[in-house]
Image: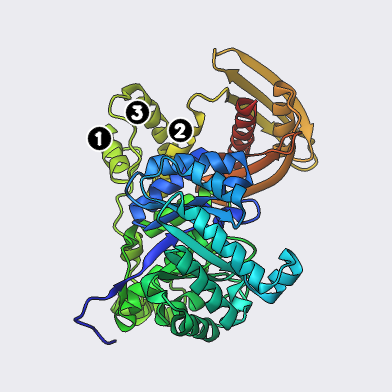
Amino acid sequence: MRYHALMSRRIVIFDTTLRDGEQSPGASMNTEEKLIIARQLLRLGVDVIEAGFPASSPGDFESVRAVAAEVGDKAVVCALARAIPADIEKAAEALVGAQRPRLHTGIGVSAIHLRGKLHINSEQAIERAVSAVKRARTFTDDVQFYAEDAGRSDPDLLARMFAAVIAAGATTLCAPDTTGFSLPADYGALITYVREHTPGIENVVLAAHCHNDLGMATASTIAGIAAGVGQVECTINGLGERAGNAALEEVVMALRLHGAELDVTTSIETTELTRASRLVSQITGIKVQPNKAVVGANAFVHASGIHQDGVLKKRTTYEILDPVEVGLNPDAIVLSARSGHAALRARLETLGLAPNEADEKGFDQIYERFLTLADRKKEVYDEDLEALMAEYDRTQNALWALATLQVSCGVPLIATATVVLTDQGGSERLASATGTGPIDAAYKAVDAILQVDCDLKEYVVQAITRGIDALGEVTVRVEAPDGRIFTGRGADGDIIVSSTKAYLNALNRMLCAG
Ligand code: MN
């Protein structure tokens, strides 16, 4: 490894979990969920948060507005718009409250996109690009331009389009490998070509945005950095359209390890990576594969005897990254039923999860829930506390709460569930139902009480920690008759209980939305 005494280039980390990441099938998030993720992105120290595509839906518009208000001056907040006046105006309107607004507009540049999708020639594309950037500049001085499908474009046309939008006022230029087509070396060569053939490129920031269709998103992004890009676009857990985007945690840790050779640094607080990954997985219901780089459950687990022996003698024999650096704390305090109020509060404060000081009654309820969990589970880890607090937040002010759930099932029994729900006034309603299994029976009993019409579209269960006593967390998606999707979550040691809580959470949200 070579070390440079001179100042390294600081790479701008542009997170698009809330925009491209949300385009992952089944990952749609509501405003409140996007705000929770935005807060974690701030803890991570990302430079730019792409908060959404305001013209795509009223919900996205509202989310961009809410994220802009939440972020303040702590990061740039970016909104996406196609090179269409109405899109740009919607994006600008959503960014009105942003202290550091960025408008992100663009148009296709590859022959396939121009002919097959836009039905225009390259000169018309450049004209539209220029007028979109000029329009965006009337709203903010920070305008990013993307040339869609740059990875499959004619480099000369790309350079001409970039030169034209620089002259029109774009300040960041992105050359996305929208389809994940490029080999890393070719992507790097494209960036080099653009840097050498675009008049004015030295006055703007060039950005990489790579998709993972061939599993090369991180590699191409790093190749882009080696070739001189100043900004990289990525998502937590590599979420995104189709096979996803470059994973933020992978790019950041690759730069942590190889930054000296590349002469670059980032502003990311890497110890927040694990928490960010868990949070995004929990909110979207998209599980992280165990062998995923950096944040997978097995990323630091050594199974072979030879490796275990090596790691015990010297950790670095088989570990290139330090788990502590990504936020995994091997010496973390484990709470138990013997832990008192003070210990629980101190741990929640460390995790940034403690309730408002004034909310003493709330804290008593949290402690009660903690004791119930600790009795069942013996050792309560940070992940369990995160799930417990998320469950507490979900059940505060819920229209309906689960009071009783009783099921009988097995072979050859007919699965039967009895459910009691209480409303906010405390009055109870009871129903029983049979089903193909205990969860189906419980859901039918809930349906019988609430009398709502909806379709269960997705059901995912995941264990929060290892072991037979681990909390099971369930995510469901239900579709209302008007096509709107509502996500619900529930966590409990009993997965039939967590399943029922998750379903009830989704229906509560549907009923609140009216
Ligand atoms: Mn993309």
- Relative side of 500 to 433, left or right: left
User: In percent of the image, x 44 and y 43: which residue is there?
Assistant: 67
**Residue 13's x, y, as percent?**
40, 63
Tell me the amino acid under the disc marked 3: Phe
Which x, y percent locates residue 179? 63, 71
Residue under numbered circle 2: 392
Which quadrant, please, contains the C terminus? Answer: top right
Q: Which residue is mark 3?
A: 363
Query: Residues under labels 2 and 1: Cα distance?
Result: 19 Å
* Residue ID at (36%, 77%): 320
Residue 511 visible somewhere in the drawing? yes
Its colouring scheme is rainbow
Kindly identify the amino acid type of the residue bearing the numbered disc 2: Tyr
Q: CA distance from mark 3 to mark 2?
A: 10 Å
Which dot, 2 or 1, sits closer to the camera?
2
In the displayed image of the protein, which residue is found farthest to the left?
5
Residue type indicated by callout 1: Ala
Picture coordinates of residue 286, whole percent (x, y)? 58, 54
Regarding mark 2 in the picture, which secondary structure is present there? helix
Quarter-wise, where is residue 268 in the image?
A: bottom left
Question: Can residue 300 be seen in the rendering of this structure?
Answer: no
In the image, residue 383 sits, relative to residue 182, either above or below, namely above
Viewer-side residue, 17 vs 418: 17
